[in-house]
C-alpha cells in the first residue's frame, strides 16, 4: 500500500476535483482505494456526500468533539459510545484520543463506502483544532516525547491501520493549500505527492514555496528521527516523502494542434517553466526515485490537462465522476440539453483519467 497526497500551496487549481476523479479512476481500474479528507474546508467530503449525510455524521460526533473523549466516555453509556464508533466517523473524531492524550480506540470505525472499491474518511470543519495540538506539541517531539511523536505521525498511522485491516492499494490524503503545521505533518509522512498546477505565475510561486518548506521540514524531521528511539522511528516512513511530479490542470486548449501540449500561448509560457522551477526548488533528496527527464513531463501528458468545461460542476452537483453523469437516474431539466449534446465528450473523460491514473501508477512503482 502507498500513502499519497495531492498538494499545491496555491488554491483554485482544481485539486479536490482531481483528487476525487483520480480516486474513482484508480478504484475502477481494480485498485482498492481509501480517500481521507484532511482539508478543514471539507471540499472532498462535500463532493462525495449529501449535506444531510455530512450533517448526520457531524451531529452524532458533536458532543464527543466538544467535551473531549474522556469526559464523553464518563458522561455517556458504553453502548452509546459503541454505537457511535460502529458507524463511519470523521477524521477529527478518529484523532480525538491523540488530541486528548488518551488511549486509542480499541477498534477502527468503518470507513464510508462510496463505491465497491472506494471508501472515505470524511472531513470535519473542526479539524483546525488538531492543527493547534500539533503546533503546541511540536517542540516536545525533539526530546522524544511519546505523545508529541504520536501527534505528528497519527494521520499516517490511521492510514496504515485502515490499510492493514481492509487491504487498500492506495490511500490518498486530501489537504488544504496551507503550509501550516497540519500539512507539514501530512506531506512529510506520506510516501509520495504530486502537484496539480495551473500554468500561471501563481502556481510557479506555489511550487517554489512547497520546495522551500519541504527543505525545512526535512531538516526538522531528520533531527527528530536521530533523537528518538528505534521503536518510535517505526511510526515514520522509511524514506522521507518523494516527489512524484506535476500535472497541468484545467488549462485552455489551443486551437492549433502544432502547439506543445495544445496549450494557448499565454499558458504555454508558464507551463514550460515548471520543470526548471521543480529542478531548482524541489530538493534532489525528494526526487531520488524519479529521473529529471521523467519529472520534466507532466503526469499523463495531455490526458487531463485541458479544461473539462462545465463537466466538473455537473459532477459535483450529482456527486458522481464526470463519466457517470449520463447514467444518473434523474437529470435536472436545465442540464438535459448539455448532457445529451456533449455525451461523447463526457464519457470520454473516463479514458483520460484512466490514462492519467496509469501514468501515475508507473511513477508510484518507482518509489519501491
Image (cartoon, helix red, strand yellow):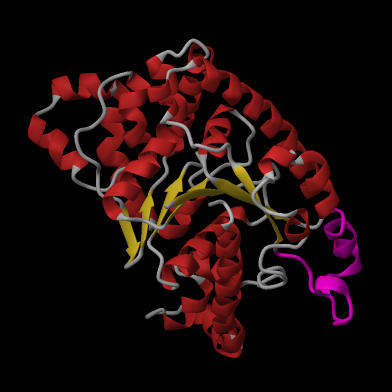
Examine the structure image and report whether residue 259 is included in the region drawn in magenta. yes
Front-most of residues 72 and 113: 113
Residue, x 61% and y 67% (percent of image)? Answer: 359
Q: Residue 98 at what x, y percent from top left?
A: 35, 25
Residue, x 58% and y 25% (percent of image)? Answer: 221
Up-down relation of residue 87 to residue 320 (above or below): above
Residue, x 52% and y 36% (percent of image)? Answer: 189
Front-most of residues 298 and 352: 298
The magenta span reads 250-273
Up-down relation of residue 92 to residue 258 (above or below): above
Q: Residue 332 at what x, y percent from top left?
A: 47, 77
Front-most of residues 118 and 163: 163
Q: Residue 84 at what x, y percent from top left?
A: 19, 40
Q: Is residue 306 left or right of 326 when viewed as pictured?
A: right
Q: Is residue 48 left or right of 362 when viewed as pictured?
A: left
Q: Residue 316 at what x, y percent from top left?
A: 51, 64
Amino acid at each position: 500500500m502507498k500513502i499519497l497526497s495531492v498538494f499545491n500551496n496555491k488554491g483554485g487549481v482544481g485539486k479536490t476535483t482531481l483528487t476525487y476523479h483520480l480516486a474513482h479512476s484508480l478504484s475502477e481500474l481494480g485498485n482498492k482505494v481509501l480517500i481521507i479528507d484532511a482539508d478543514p474546508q471539507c471540499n472532498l467530503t462535500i463532493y462525495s456526500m449529501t449535506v444531510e449525510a455530512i450533517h448526520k455524521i457531524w451531529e452524532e460526533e458533536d458532543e464527543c468533539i466538544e467535551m473531549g473523549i474522556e469526559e464523553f466516555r464518563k458522561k455517556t453509556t458504553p453502548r452509546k459510545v459503541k454505537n457511535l464508533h460502529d458507524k463511519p466517523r470523521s477524521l477529527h473524531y478518529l484523532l480525538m484520543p491523540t488530541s486528548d492524550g488518551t488511549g486509542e480506540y480499541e477498534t477502527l470505525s468503518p470507513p464510508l463506502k462510496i463505491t465497491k472499491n472506494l471508501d472515505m474518511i470524511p472531513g470535519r470543519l473542526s479539524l483546525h483544532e488538531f492543527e493547534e495540538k500539533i503546533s503546541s506539541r511540536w517542540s516536545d517531539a525533539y526530546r522524544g516525547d511519546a505523545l508529541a511523536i504520536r501527534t505528528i505521525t497519527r494521520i499516517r498511522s490511521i492510514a496504515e491501520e485502515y490499510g492493514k485491516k481492509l487491504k487498500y492499494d492506495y490511500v490518498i490524503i486530501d489537504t488544504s493549500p496551507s503550509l501550516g503545521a497540519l500539512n507539514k505533518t501530512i506531506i512529510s509522512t506520506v510516501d509520495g505527492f504530486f502537484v496539480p498546477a495551473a500554468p500561471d505565475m501563481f502556481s510557479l510561486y506555489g511550487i517554489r514555496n512547497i520546495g522551500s518548506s519541504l527543505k525545512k521540514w526535512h531538516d526538522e524531521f531528520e533531527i527528530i528521527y536521530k533523537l528518538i528511539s528505534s521503536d518510535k522511528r517505526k511510526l515514520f516512513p522509511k524514506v522521507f516523502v518523494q516527489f512524484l511530479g506535476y500535472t497541468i490542470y484545467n488549462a485552455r486548449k489551443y486551437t492549433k494542434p502544432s502547439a506543445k501540449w495544445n496549450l494557448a500561448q499565454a499558458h504555454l509560457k508558464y507551463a514550460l517553466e515548471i520543470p526548471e522551477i521543480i529542478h531548482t526548488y524541489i530538493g534532489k533528496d525528494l526526487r531520488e526515485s524519479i529521473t529529471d527527464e521523467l519529472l520534466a513531463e507532466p503526469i499523463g501528458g495531455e490526458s487531463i490537462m485541458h479544461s473539462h468545461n462545465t463537466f466538473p460542476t455537473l459532477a459535483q452537483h450529482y456527486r458522481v465522476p464526470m463519466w457517470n453523469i449520463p447514467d444518473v437516474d434523474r437529470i435536472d431539466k436545465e442540464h438535459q440539453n448539455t448532457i445529451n449534446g456533449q455525451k461523447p465528450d463526457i464519457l470520454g473523460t473516463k479514458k483520460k483519467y484512466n490514462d492519467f491514473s496509469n501514468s501515475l501508477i508507473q511513477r508510484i512503482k518507482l518509489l519501491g
